[in-house]
Image (cartoon, rainbow, N blue to C red):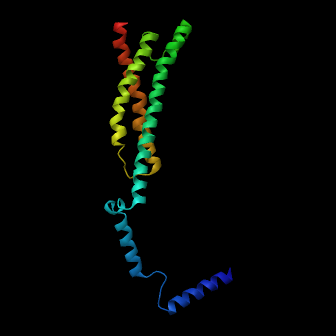
């Protein structure tokens, strides 16, 4: 340990004697200016590596968001279809029908119609992408889970209920 300390002292003495500090104010100032200049969006997009990183980040955020929406949307559909299938197997299993859908036929038809309406509605989101906000990764995931997770789960529940009411009038 003493050797390392004395070696560092010797190096600093040598650099000071040559009047060259390890950290020169002019060099630090120039480095900071260049760093901020290179982080400007106009300059970053000219660099192919940074352009690829930015595009990849945006695609990943949009993909994760759509996956979150899709999983919660599928769960809502399963709450409609699976109890309907069990009601056919045994009327005592009708207690599983937590959404209180009219019949197995209307439940399945409502889930299919809801899915047919939701998928085209997601196309603009997939093409436009999710708006990026410069916040931390965990905060961004929490925000997307809240918005698209609840939207993917709550929206289809309500949609399937409304469609089931309409389909129940005709079946």
Image point (45%, 44%), residue name = 141
Between 137 and 95, the one lying in front of the other is 137
Horizontal and vertical percent for residue 61?
Answer: 42, 45
Image point (38%, 20%), residue name = 113
Residue 3 in view (yes/no): yes
Tell me the quadrant of the picture where the N terminus can be found: bottom right
Horizontal and vertical percent for residue 77?
Answer: 46, 23
Image point (41%, 46%), residue name = 59
On the picture, is 170 further left or further right than 103? left
Residue 100 in view (yes/no): no
Horizontal and vertical percent for residue 91?
Answer: 54, 6
Identify whether 43 is placed above or below 142.
below
Residue at the outermost front position: 48
On the picture, is 23 further left or further right than 44? right
Q: Quadrant of residue 146?
A: top left
Residue at the outermost left position: 42
Image point (38%, 62%), residue name = 47
Horizontal and vertical percent for residue 153?
Answer: 43, 29
Tell me the quadrant of the picture where the C terminus can be found: top left
How many numbered circles are shown? 0
Identify whether 28 is placed above or below 110.
below
Residue at the outermost bottom position: 17
């Amino acid at each position: 340990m003493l050797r390392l300390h004395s070696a560092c002292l010797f190096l600093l003495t040598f650099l000071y004697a040559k009047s060259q500090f390890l950290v020169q104010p002019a060099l630090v100032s120039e480095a900071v200016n260049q760093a901020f200049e290179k982080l400007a969006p106009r300059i970053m997009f000219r660099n192919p590596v940074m352009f690829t990183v930015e595009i990849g980040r945006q695609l990943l955020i949009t993909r994760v968001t759509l996956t979150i929406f899709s999983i919660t949307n599928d769960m809502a559909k399963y709450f409609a279809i699976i109890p309907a299938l069990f009601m056919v197997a045994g009327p005592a299993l009708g207690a599983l029908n937590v959404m209180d859908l009219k019949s197995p036929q209307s439940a399945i038809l409502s889930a299919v119609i809801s899915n047919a309406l939701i998928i085209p509605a997601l196309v603009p989101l997939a093409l436009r992408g999710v708006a990026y906000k410069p916040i931390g990764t965990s905060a961004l995931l929490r925000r997307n889970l809240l918005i698209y997770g609840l939207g993917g789960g709550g929206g289809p529940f309500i949609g399937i209920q409304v469609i089931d009411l309409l389909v129940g009038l005709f079946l």
